[in-house]
Image: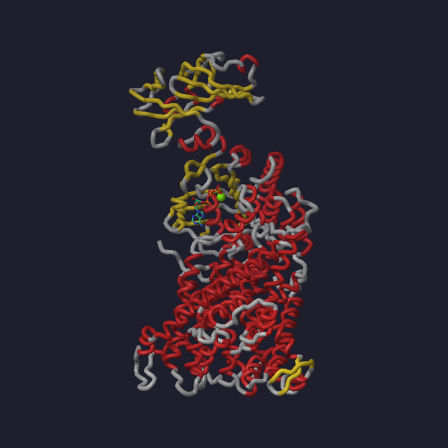
Amino acid sequence: MADLKIQGLAKSYKDVRVLESINLDIASGEFFTLLGPSGCGKTTLLRTIAGFQHQDRGEIIVKGERIDHKPAHKRDIGMVFQDYAIFPHLSVADNVAFGLKARSLPKGEIEARVNESLKMVRLDGYQDRLPGEMSGGQQQRIGLARAMAIRPTLLLMDEPLSNLDAKLRIELREDIRDIQRRLGITTIYVTHDQEEALAVSDRICVMNKGNVEQIGTPFEIYRKPLRRFAASFVGTMNFLPGQLEGGRLRVGSQSIDFPVDASGPVELAIRPENVELASTSPHGGTIALKGEVLKVTFLGREAHYTLRTEAGEIVAQVADPAQDFIEMEGRPVEVRLPLQKIALFRLNGDVLDAGQAR
Amino acid sequence: MKRRVRFDIWTFVLIAAWVILIALLIWPLSSVLHASLLDNDTGAFSLVHYFQIATVKAYQRAIGNTLLAGFGGMSGALILGVTLAFVTTRFHIFGRALIQTLAVVALVSPPFIGAYAWIVLFGASGVVRKGLDAIGISIPPLYGAAGVILVFAFKFFPHVFLITSGALASINRSVEEAAESLGVSPTKRLFTVTFPLILPAISASALLTFVLSIADFGTPRIIGRDFNVLATEAFNLYGSEVGGNPGMASALSVALIVLSMVIVFGQRWVLRKNVYHSNLIKKPERKRVGGLKAVGLHVLAYAIVLIGALPAIIVVLFSFRRTSGPVFQPGVSLQSYERVISTVSDPIWNTLIFSSTAVVAIVITGTLIGYLISRRPGIATGALDATLMVPYVVPGIVMGIAFITRFNEPPLALTGTGLIIVMAVFVRRLPYSARSVAAALKQVGPNLEDAAVSLGYSPSKAFVKVTVPLILPGIMAGALMSFVTAMNELSSSLVLYVGSTITMPVRIYLSVMDGEYGTASALSTILLAMTVIAVYAAFHLSGRKESALL
Ligand SMILES: Nc1ncnc2c1ncn2[C@@H]1O[C@H](COP(=O)(O)OP(=O)(O)OP(=O)(O)O)[C@@H](O)[C@H]1O
Ligand SMILES: [Mg+2]
């Protein structure tokens, strides 16, 4: 049980700034996910927290105590490495037992925990193999078992499931989540898989270029993005150019009442599943645009319509598509954007407080 | 905000390493620099010796010849060593253990008498030359620059072989396979992927062979004839009773050191961006080939090691020849052994005790320093790395003289003890170990150690538990080279020995000087057998079965 506070953390490699000034406040037992494009500094952040490298500025506080000057091996922070870092000279069981031996646990306990961890990652029975004789995904799971086995106060996982098949990935992420909850290990998790992030996290932190863009629950991140970057990076988002003027919002040739103080160019954002096509009857205020169906992608449970509107191209998602919708390519259609579901972003990327509009 | 200096175990290792190098290297060698700056007659400070190096034709020729011998020996050794390493690590070759043994035998080709064996074979009246002449093939005698370079190539290739085969065997197979899948032909892949990946090992062995070539004085002295190099000039000026010129000799030694420093920095420049790590998980496999290709590969591998081991083989054969005084007679006999048997036990024990003591110290210190060099880059470690090159190039005789000068008076009156011989061997062979460990470490990703640390091991424990097992091949290769060269150390011991601390190589040298080639051959054979047995024992005890050396 430990809470983690990070204040003003900055890190450069030579003259390249990789972390600008990171502030995080992670509660005890929380499952906290870092989400961000490749190269945005996620691994760097984890390695700094673990103590493999030292920050240039800022503080890392665990349980109210600064740990910056503690050497890495005394921090009791477990880590799953992006490139696995499996010890090639040790058997699978010895890899997993490695950290337990450092804690001088009794032999029986070590064996029990090794077996338990290996069972968790579905590698029971591989105890005596050498890592060189295992597949890439299996090696990754050794690393996962090894870090979980020591039950650290803080667990850092750098894309621990990236190399597994979709089914195993879903199984393991549930297991990780269960164990994490049961043991109350505060966890920082890095993933590129947005669905995974939304599914398992208590909170998600969207990072970009060494900065925190937004921190929030999965619902907040998905439904109430505070920054354009978060909106565009998580899930699919349509963006249309718009203009605010004297309490009205203009999109394409449409203009609608929009009582906010701000004025100037904005970007209107809306998720595909919120775009309505003409056949549904409107409720509340909507922006209605003339459009044409360019392409229909049938995905089974849903269909994606790529639409050309007077304001630009957008994608609409239609659940449980019926036969006739699929034949709509090339036909004109009316596209409705419900005001309740849109977000507006200023040109600097900040959201325009939508509360004012409602 | 400034970064806090973090003290850990490696800070202390760094300090200890500097203390050792200052006490055993810089302090003694400062006497050489000092001597080079004094006028021989007046004893006053003067740059006259350096001025002479810059103006006297003979010295300039010596510098040119030294460079020629250095680059020539280096290129030859690289071609032979890398070829052999590649063939034996990538293809299924019968008798790998034999090849490795012969390579070690070539490595210990006994001092002086090795060069003598070359003359016996390829000299003006050499056996092989005469034989070839009889069937109408005429080759020039093995004197001069070409001979020296050839001998260097065959004498020093085992260093390259040992260093690079370790590296070749631990390339991640996936990387090569990736190149292959991208449509790169095997030959092209060799030059665009494989060699760049083992560049640390190749360049380290290039540096080593260059420096060994320019510091060797026995070979150019016996084979070079009028091919004078800095080492022979220095040796003559130190050694000759009449017309000795210690100031000039010291200046030439300093020139040698400076020359090799340039090469050291050259290598560091080549490697400036070179940090490749593989996690060693998928090791390359040996390919089975058949037919003509297999025959060709076997011929190539065996030819290299057999020619390299030729001097040693000749010496062994000669040790069983009948002699009359210094002259060999037809027929087989144990005469030579009978003559040495009663006097040989002291030198044998001395050799074993001195070299094993030195090697234990070398392996421990060298491993720690090798780690510092490759994992804690910084000004202090960079300078350490460069300083560590000095012992390579200082001719043994210079080192010996420096030790005598500095450790002659209480509280450091060590002259005449075994300790001073051990110390000289230690500091001269420490770089082998440090460098080969540094090269091995270049291929082990630092993440593995981080992983151990995150699991609760202190950095020093993580090093012992994870890194040491992974770089064991590198440590063993370094230990092996230190050990065989320590057992065969001649030049510094020659200056430092007294009656009770005589070693085998010194004993051999004295026999050669007395013209007793028979007894010298017998002694050399004994030393050779000791070396091979010791190497095998060491590797057997360390439990590495499949391959004795790698
Ligand atoms: N040792 C290093 N020296 C210099 N730059 C580095 C080093 N390690 C990482 N970087 C740079 O720092 C930035 C952040 O790297 P980091 O590994 O933290 O990214 P990441 O968010 O984990 O990316 P990914 O999702 O691809 O793993 C990158 O631009 C990278 O090029
Ligand atoms: Mg990363």
Q: Position of residue B57 (x, y in %)?
A: 35, 74
Query: Foreground: B115 or A117?
Result: B115
- Extreme left residue here? A246
Q: Is residue B326 left or right of residue A251?
A: right
Q: Could you tell me if residue B338 is visible in this image?
A: yes
Residue A172 placed where, x, y %? 61, 39
Residue B324 rendering spot, x and y as whole percentages: 63, 87
Relative to A137, say whether B479 is above or below. below
The image quadrant that residue B481 belongs to is: bottom right
Closer-to-camera residue (A218/A280) = A280
- What residue is at 65 percent from the left and 72 percent from the top? B533
Horizontally, residue B358 falls left or right of residue A215, namely right
Nearest the eye: B223 or B506: B223
Task: Tell me, yes or no, if residue A186 can be seen here.
Answer: no
- Residue at the far right in the pictured view: A125
Q: Residue at x 41, y 42 (%)?
A: A210
Q: Quadrant of the C terminus of chain A?
A: top left
